[in-house]
Image (cartoon, rainbow, N blue to C red):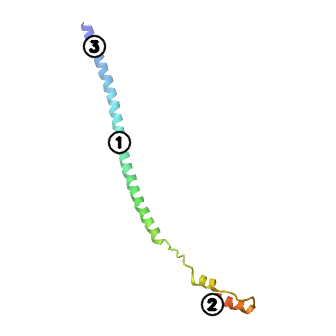
């Protein structure tokens, strides 16, 4: 009976040593994971701040682009309207010359 009790104590001691070894490994892993978590949290904060700065710069650029936009006026110019009104009455050189003079008149 004493031998059985001694054998049980030795088994408990070995099991305890094994569990302490596993616990030590798990604690090291936990520390490693905590460090990685801290590093990733810092990286996330940095990236988030960079994204915010990029969004601000992009909004500023978009406003500058809108401010620099050119409005196109589709109304025909006076010169174009004047060209529409020139009619050559006949095929004589004098009529054509008068038409061209009218076309280039200021």
Residue 16 appears in which quarter of the rendering? top left
Q: Residue at x 40, y 61 (%)?
A: 56
Q: Residue at x 75, y 88 (%)?
A: 91
Which residue is the site of mark 2?
105
Residue 9 vs 40, above or below: the answer is above
The mark total stands at 3
Instruction: List x then y, in percent, for residue 99.
Output: 68, 89
Residues at circles 2 and 3 in contact by the CB criterion of under 8 Å = no
Which residue is the site of mark 3?
8
**Mark 2, residues whose alpha carbon is within 10 Å: few (<14), some, or many (≥20)?**
few
Instruction: List x then y, in percent, for residue 83.
Output: 63, 84
Which residue is the site of mark 1?
35
Q: Residue at x 27, y 8 (%)?
A: 3
**Mark 3, residues whose alpha carbon is within 10 Å: few (<14), some, or many (≥20)?**
few
C-alpha gap between disc 1 and disc 3 = 40 Å
Residue 105 vs 10, above or below: the answer is below
C-alpha gap between disc 2 and disc 3 = 121 Å
In the image shown, does 64 or 90 lie closer to the viewer?
90
Q: Secondary structure at mark 2?
A: loop
Q: Earlier in the sequence, mark 1 or mark 3?
A: 3
**Mark 1, residues whose alpha carbon is within 10 Å: few (<14), some, or many (≥20)?**
few
Residues at circles 2 and 1 in contact by the CB criterion of under 8 Å = no
Q: Secondary structure at mark 3?
A: helix
Q: Nearer the viewer, mark 2 or mark 3?
A: 2
Instruction: List x then y, in percent, for residue 8.
Output: 28, 13
Mark number, residue 93: none
């Amino acid at each position: 009976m004493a031998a059985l009790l001694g054998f049980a104590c030795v088994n408990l001691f070995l099991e305890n040593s094994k569990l302490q070894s596993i616990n030590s490994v798990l604690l090291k892993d936990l520390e490693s994971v905590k460090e990685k978590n801290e590093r990733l949290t810092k990286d996330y904060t940095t990236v988030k701040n960079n994204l915010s700065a990029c969004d601000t710069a992009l909004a500023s650029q978009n406003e500058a682009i809108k401010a620099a936009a050119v409005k196109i006026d589709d109304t025909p110019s006076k010169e174009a309207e004047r060209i529409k009104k020139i009619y050559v009455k006949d095929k004589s050189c004098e009529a054509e010359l008068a038409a061209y003079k009218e076309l280039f008149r200021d």
